[in-house]
Amino acid sequence: MSGARSTAAGALLDVRGLAAQYGPTRVLHGIDFSVAEGGITAILGANGAGKTTLLRAVCNMIRTSGEVRLAGERIDGQATEAIVRRGVAHVPDGRGTFMNLSVEENLRLGAHTRRDRTEVGADCERMYAHFPRLRERRRQQAGTLSGGEQQMLAVSRALMLRPRLLLLDEPSFGLAPLIVQQLFEILRVINQGEKIGMLLVEQNAAMALALADHAYLLETGRVVMSGAAEAIRSDESIRRSYLGY
Amino acid sequence: MDLFLHQILAGLATGGIYASVALALVMIYQATHLVNFAQGEMAMFATYLAWALLQAGVPYWGAFAITVVSAFVLGVAIERIVIRPVENSPILVIVIVFIALLVIFNSLAGWIFSYTIKPFPSPFPAQPLFGNSYVSSHELGSTAITLVVLLLLFVFFRFTPLGLAMRAAAQNPVSSRLVGIRVGWMLALGWGLAAAIGAIAGMMVAPTVFLEPNMMGGVLLYAFAGALLGGIDSPGGAVLGGFVVGVLENVVGAYVGTELKLTLALVVIVGVLVVRPSGMFGRVNVVRV
């Protein structure tokens, strides 16, 4: 962990002393983490560890304190909409589908803040190429999609922003193992092809560690362990005692 | 038969007014899940503004345009200044604010313009168009204007990015913020549009009901009945419901008796709430447990 400070200097996302609370209940107790430019950082932890809260805190959806820097610039304290406009896309807990709108309208909403309207259509096509199921259902009400399809839609909608940083809240949740593998493979392709940084929150530690370059282990709102994903994956004692596989 | 046909056509003309106001109610309802009781009084106040402009010598369509724009600005201002601070308050607080707005606009109009009934001009000729004997020019003209307004709104919400963002903001504010939509401004825009639609409805109905501070009371009730009949969360349903209520009202007035006209609106409201609370086209909310 000696290299943490130096890598953080050129980081895409750098977070120091992040704390958050719901009413009087503190959920995060001053945590530090970062996402490298074009890198993937995984946040692992059990239910209730504060993973979803951490993502919400980064884009200021809840009361938060601490420093959040995106490519060196402070974004903490800014409105959620403003943070999105700086290129932070969020695949939220529960997928955030616009149930009564069509699949295509959901995608177009993802590009709401973009000025290059002419390219939005082409980007829709790229999403359909990644997820052909969405093309089949483009005119359908998004509320009628299955859980897996809605997850694909949520990822696609976030990518329509052409983000610099993608926040992913348990993308594997409720999906069949085969679909989880497909989804993670697509995330890898997008990360490598378009250099989009990702902050991935997951309970599925094995999948997340295989995708990420860096990982943090969260327990009741504190970071209890961090390091290169590869190192954590190969350390059997950590795996056994914290990750349970 | 002639009388019946005349009643139907006249009903469609007033139905168009109800449809517009019903649509304004639905727009606010979709965003707040509350019925804006002050919608009618806001429209009435805008109509007084049009009257004052006409008195000052402004030509009709000039006064019309200025009124619509002013109503839009007023609607946005009301959302920002009055509704915004109570946005997250309990329902009762917001309902009280709506009622307060109703009373304030009513008294303000009475205070500024007095409670005496004033005639309001129609922009359409006094002779029936095309030599027909069924509908007056005003009925035909106001129906046409209503239909144009409804068509413009449909195109706006269906085919423009801003319209899409407004629908998204009303449906799912949290997700909307996450794609960068300024939800607060979308709601304010909704209030502005609703107020502008109401202003047009007010100017179209004023020549028939005459201008006075309580002129929209009945209209709002019928519009509410129409919105409920069609489905309070369905814009298309509310428009259709408005037309249906307009025709029903006229037919009942002609064949059963004028005394029962307003009763009809209440019967529709209670009937819909008892038999089919989501209306003809409303979404039945099914919650997965």
Image (cartoon, grey):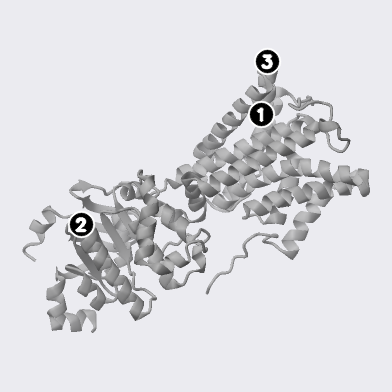
| Residue B99 visible here | no
Mark 1 / mark 3, whichever is N-terminal? 3
Q: Residue B57 bears which disc, if any?
A: 3
Q: Is residue A230 above or below residue B67?
A: below
Q: Are marks 3 and 2 in contact (CB under 8 Å)?
A: no
> Which amino acid lies under the numbered mark 2 shown in the image of this protein?
Gly
Asked whether, in this view, residue B275 is left or right of residue A218, the answer is right
Asked whether residue A51 is in view, the answer is yes
Position of B18 relative to A58 (above/below):
above
Label 3 or label 2, whichever lies nearer to me, is: 3
Whether label 1 touches label 3, CB < 8 Å? no
On the image, the x and y values in percent for residue B51 come to 70, 23
Q: Secondary structure at mark 3?
A: loop
Pointers 1 and 3 within a single chain: yes
**Residue located beneath label 1 in the image:** B108
Residue beneath the point at 26% across and 53% down? A65
In the picture, measured across the screen, residue A140 lies left or right of residue A68, that is right
Q: Chain of mark 1?
A: B
Disc 1 to disc 2, C-alpha distance: 54 Å
Q: Which mark is residue A179?
A: none
According to the image, label 2 marks what residue? A17
Residue type of the residue flagged with mark 1: Leu
Which sits in the foreground, A21 or A84? A84
Real-space CA distance between mark 1 and mark 3, rounded to the nearest whole angstrom = 23 Å
Pick the front one: B156 or A30: B156
- Residue name at image x 49 percent, y 38 percent: B80
